[in-house]
């Protein structure tokens, strides 16, 4: 997956994104935000915030920073911030593999439906660990490669196309990803239709 392709893909689909991905993925979003157990005044980073579909789910008492690579997705997120009158949200155009935040800058880091949509998922998680304080939570919600051999083979079959288009990599395997990123999950839950997505919560130990 190439950066230019990802940027272009999400710039192009931004007008239709909410129509396509709001309702079907909503249950997972609610579970993901609640898994962070955000307390008043805490600092939260959302990686690849997209059009901001998670924004209404956050408590207003937290300080939220949302970053994304796509200007057009962020434009939609900004419209949502204004529509909801959210004074606690900052949106920035930034590459998740090269975050400009200081070490330990956040109490929680969230990535929903992002980790298979980035060119370098291991580096994104390493950056998430760096900017999350020790004891903070890193939560990701994603479709990972199926353990069912037939489904897994199908995912491998379509992966070259979806990857070339810059959309997502359906055959990203969870266990090696976590190992390479140095993360140990304290909770993995299946969510959304057919339990096809996994919600993974890790406590940052560094
Ligand atoms: C499938 S969308 C998910 C959007 C949102 N998180 C949601 O739950 O609807 C993936 C998002 O990740 C963003 N993205 C992909 N690679 C990125 C990177 N390296 N840095 C920041 N954002 C990235 C895309 O621009 C896109 O907005």
Image (cartoon, rainbow, N blue to C red):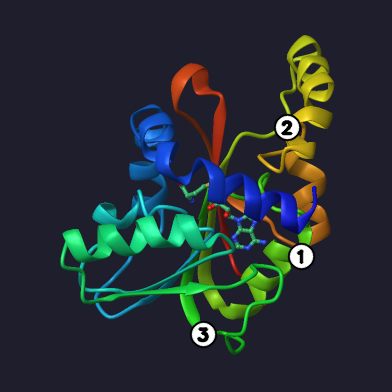
Pointer 1 and pointer 2: residues touching (CB < 8 Å)?
A: no
Circle 3 sits in a helix, a strand or a loop, which is it? loop
Q: Position of residue 121 (x, y in %)?
A: 74, 55
Q: Residues within 10 Å of mark 1 (few under 14, many from 20)?
A: some
Mark found first going from the N terminus, 1 or 3: 3
* Image position of 140 (left or right of 116): left
Circle 2 sits in a helix, a strand or a loop, which is it? helix
Of the pair 47 and 190, the residue shown nearer to us: 47
Circle 1 sits in a helix, a strand or a loop, which is it? helix
* Image position of 84 (left or right of 94): left
Question: 31 above or below 82?
Answer: above
Q: Position of residue 199 (x, y in %)?
A: 52, 42
Residue at horizontal 66 percent and vertical 40 percent from the top = 167
Q: Position of residue 192 (x, y in %)?
A: 44, 27
CA gap, disc 3 and disc 2: 34 Å
CA gap, disc 1 and disc 3: 17 Å
Instruction: Determine if residue 145 is in view.
Output: yes
Of the pair 70 and 120, the residue shown nearer to us: 70
Outermost residue, top side:
150
The circle drawn on residue 123 is 1
Of the pair 39 and 20, the residue shown nearer to us: 20
Residue at horizontal 80 percent and vertical 47 percent from the top = 1
Mark found first going from the N terminus, 3 or 2: 3
Q: Residues within 10 Å of mark 2 (few under 14, many from 20)?
A: some
Residue at horizontal 68 percent and vertical 34 percent from the top = 144
Residue at mark 2: 162
Question: 48 above or below 116?
Answer: below
Residue at mark 3: 105
* Image position of 153 (left or right of 148): right
């Amino acid at each position: 997956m190439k950066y230019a392709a990802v940027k272009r893909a999400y710039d192009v689909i931004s007008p239709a994104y909410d129509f396509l991905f709001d309702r079907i993925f909503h249950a997972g979003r609610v579970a993901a935000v609640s898994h962070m157990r955000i307390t008043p005044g805490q600092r939260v980073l959302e990686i690849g915030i997209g059009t901001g579909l998670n924004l209404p789910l956050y408590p207003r008492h937290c300080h939220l920073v949302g970053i994304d690579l796509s200007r057009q997705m962020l434009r939609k997120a900004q419209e949502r911030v204004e529509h909801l009158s959210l004074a606690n949200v900052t949106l920035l155009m930034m590459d998740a593999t090269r975050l400009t935040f200081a070490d330990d800058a956040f109490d929680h880091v969230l990535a929903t439906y992002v980790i298979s949509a980035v060119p370098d998922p291991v580096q994104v998680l390493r950056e998430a660990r760096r900017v999350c304080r020790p004891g903070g939570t890193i939560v990701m919600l994603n479709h990972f490669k199926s353990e069912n051999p037939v489904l897994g083979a199908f995912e491998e079959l379509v992966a070259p196309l979806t990857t070339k288009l810059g959309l997502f990599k359906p055959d990203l395997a969870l266990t090696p990803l976590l190992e390479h990123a140095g993360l140990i999950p304290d909770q993995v839950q299946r969510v959304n239709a057919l339990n096809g997505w996994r919600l993974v919560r890790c406590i940052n130990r560094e």
